[in-house]
Image (tube, rainbow, N blue to C red):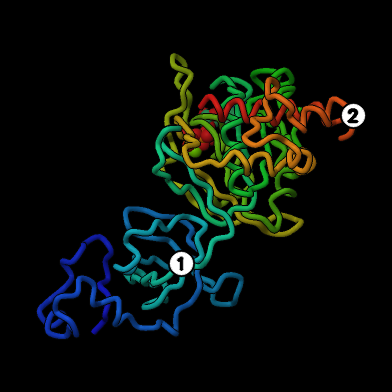
Amino acid sequence: MSWLPDDDEGDDEGLDESDFRARPNPKANRPRTKRRPAHLDAQVARVLGVDRGRYAVLVGEDGPDERDVVATRARELRKQPIVTGDRVRVVGDRTGSEGTLARIVGIEPRTTLLRRSADDTDQVERVVVANADQMLVVVAAADPEPRERLVDRYLIAALDAGIRPLLVVTKTDLADPSAFLAHFDGLDLEVFTSGQGEMPTERIGAALVGRSTVFVGHSGVGKSTLVNALVPSAMRATGHVNVVTGRGRHTSSSTVSLRYRGAGGTGWVIDTPGVRSFGLGHVDPANVLRAFTDLAEAAQDCPRGCTHLPDAPDCAIVEAVAEGRLGPSAPARLDSLQRLLTTFAHR
Ligand SMILES: Nc1nc2c(ncn2[C@@H]2O[C@H](COP(=O)(O)OP(=O)(O)OP(=O)(O)O)[C@@H](O)[C@H]2O)c(=O)[nH]1
Ligand SMILES: [Mg+2]
């Protein structure tokens, strides 16, 4: 008999009489956790996607027996989010044959966790993706109109999570993105431009090698279109943008991880659904500052509680930049930092 039910959805409905009889302490609320098997034969797998309690996982990655397996989650993990990009321990039937289900019994420690909240005051975080080390922020030059504050939000979330941001402006066949891009001059940010018939798949592909890159952006900006160009087997559905509202149709409804295979090597691409808002309720602004290494160092001489904004009294960063101590590119970087902090403060 298995100690754990196959399905994660029920709470205690999986218990039967024999479970109760076997309880060492009938009054204990959670006796079963004590009897949890060690799962010595568990295998580490990569979560590729999640759909209504079922997880598509990749077992034996890069080995001769690499295969896609469908898994459920063990009951003891039912309160923990398991998301695309997670590395999990699986037991049970891992053949991947039609109709079989393996079971996830543990989550490996995460290197990064990209989170968002529904809105900025909401402390409840939703985990978007685990273990990504890059974020490609996708924004359209037009249709839908680009909004720098939304890009700022993604950048803040990335810097907070310790994820390296990249930016791509799509639909350059529809509008010239130069004025929009000027906003991001002061950031250490690799920028790509893409248009119909001239997608920079090789350049973007080179940036994907050896990394796990999550594609984020409003609905309709062309995330899935890019993913399909980079991973031809992906066949992600793409949708039209409503001509009246200028909004996308939320074509992609789930987050999936796909393998990029390019001339220079392989990487992971994670396509996400466009979201209307990317709340920053959980972000610590200190992490944003930390991403601007030299400015963060200067900030050590700031008064306690310094906001580093232009009107902050005795801000050591502002002074160091004004005195030219941080080099010629520092003013632009300070502008960017202040913009991000302002976006954050007014959230
Ligand atoms: N003109 C033009 N249209 C593009 C370009 N890239 C994508 N599109 C179109 O934009 C529409 C939306 O593209 P998708 O790839 O579905 O956008 P998405 O970001 O995945 O949207 P969601 O899945 O809803 O979040 C489709 O009709 C694409 O053909 C481009 O460079 N130029
Ligand atoms: Mg999509």
Whether ligand 1 has any atom under 8 Å from the Cβ at mark 2 is answered as no
Can residue 186 be seen here? The reply is no
Residue at the image position 42 percent from the left and 73 percent from the top = 90
Q: Which residue is mark 2?
A: 324
Name the side, left or right, on which 209 lies relative to 328. left
> Type of residue at label 1?
Ile
Secondary element type, mark 2? loop
Residue at the image position 69 percent from the left and 44 percent from the top = 290
Can residue 21 be seen here? The reply is yes
The image quadrant where one finds ligand 1 is top right
Q: Position of residue 232 (x, y in %)?
A: 59, 49
> Type of residue at label 2?
Gly
Q: Which residue is mark 1?
A: 107
**Relative vertical location of residue 271 with respect to residue 260 in this rendering, above or below:** above
Query: Which mark, by number, is residue 28?
Result: none
Q: Quadrant of residue 135?
A: top right
Q: How dense is the environment of label 2, judged by Cα within 10 Å: few (below 14), some, or many (20 and up)?
A: few
Name the side, left or right, on which 120 lies relative to 230. left
Along the line of sight, the residue nearer the viewer: 293 or 173: 293
Number of labelled discs? 2
Q: Position of residue 48 (x, y in %)?
A: 49, 58
**Relative vertical location of residue 51 with respect to residue 105 in this rendering, above or below:** above
- The quarter in which the N terminus is drawn is bottom left
Q: Quadrant of residue 73?
A: bottom left
Secondary element type, mark 1? strand
